[in-house]
Image (cartoon, rainbow, N blue to C red):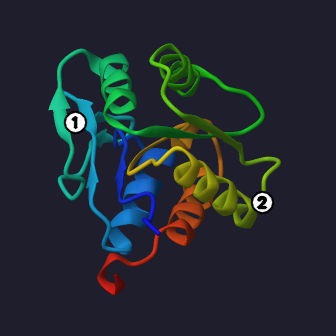
């Protein structure tokens, strides 16, 4: 049986984006994604450890490119969709891309792992775009996403 996902992409913002990238790096999974020119993020420049491609057009263009590049998009949020997280959902729906929403205030990490695994298998999501709020807008988003993505991924060195 083919394993999904095989690559994690995101935009490199603090919070959900970085948590997903860090989990993938820690598990020896390939990462990619697009980020705004200048590697813009709320905490300054996105560190070079994240192998992201800079594109013009700011956050909106970055979001659109990552949704288009991914085989499916996974969005984490708490209680309600806001700002860039809501934009990600809107773009995924408009592009008719597979989309999975996880409300971290309701879904325990272990259940989230199973829901995401099922989503990736059912939709054959090889490249998973992970999105969600930045750290300053959602307390606890980083550890939650890091745990879910870490548990989702099997260490590539073992396969």
User: Of the numbered discs in the image, which one, if any, rests on residue 123?
Assistant: none
- Residue 90 lies left or right of residue 109; in this view the side is left
* Crowd class of label 2 (few under 14; some 14 to 19; many from 20; radius 10 Å): few
User: Of the numbered discs in the image, which one, if any, rests on residue 39?
Assistant: 1
Q: Is mark 2 on a helix, strand or loop?
A: loop
* Residue that sits furthest to the right in the current view: 106
* Residue 4, quarter of picture: bottom left
Give the residue number, with chain letter if any, for mark 2.
108
Callout in the foreground (2, 1):
2
Q: Can residue 15 be seen in this view?
A: no
The residue sitting at 38% across, 26% down in the picture is 63
The residue sitting at 54% across, 54% down in the picture is 121
Picture coordinates of residue 148 (x, y %)? 59, 62
* Residue 93, quarter of picture: top right
* Residue 28, quarter of picture: bottom left
Q: Tell me the quarter of the image containing the C terminus.
A: bottom left
Q: What element carries label 1?
A: loop
């Amino acid at each position: 049986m083919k394993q999904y996902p095989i690559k994690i992409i995101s935009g490199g913002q603090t919070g959900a984006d970085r948590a997903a990238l860090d989990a993938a790096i820690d598990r020896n999974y390939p990462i990619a994604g697009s980020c705004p020119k200048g590697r813009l993020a709320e905490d300054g420049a996105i560190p070079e450890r994240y192998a992201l491609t800079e594109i013009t057009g700011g956050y909106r263009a970055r979001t659109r490119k990552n949704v288009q590049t991914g085989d499916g998009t996974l969005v984490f949020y708490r209680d309600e969709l806001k700002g860039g997280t809501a934009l990600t959902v809107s773009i995924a729906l408009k592009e008719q891309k597979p989309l999975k929403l996880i409300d971290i205030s309701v879904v325990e990490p272990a259940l989230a792992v199973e829901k995401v695994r099922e989503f990736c298998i059912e939709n054959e999501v090889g490249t998973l775009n992970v999105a969600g709020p930045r750290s300053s807008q959602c307390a606890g988003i980083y550890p939650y996403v890091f745990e879910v993505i870490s548990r989702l991924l099997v260490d590539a060195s073992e396969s």
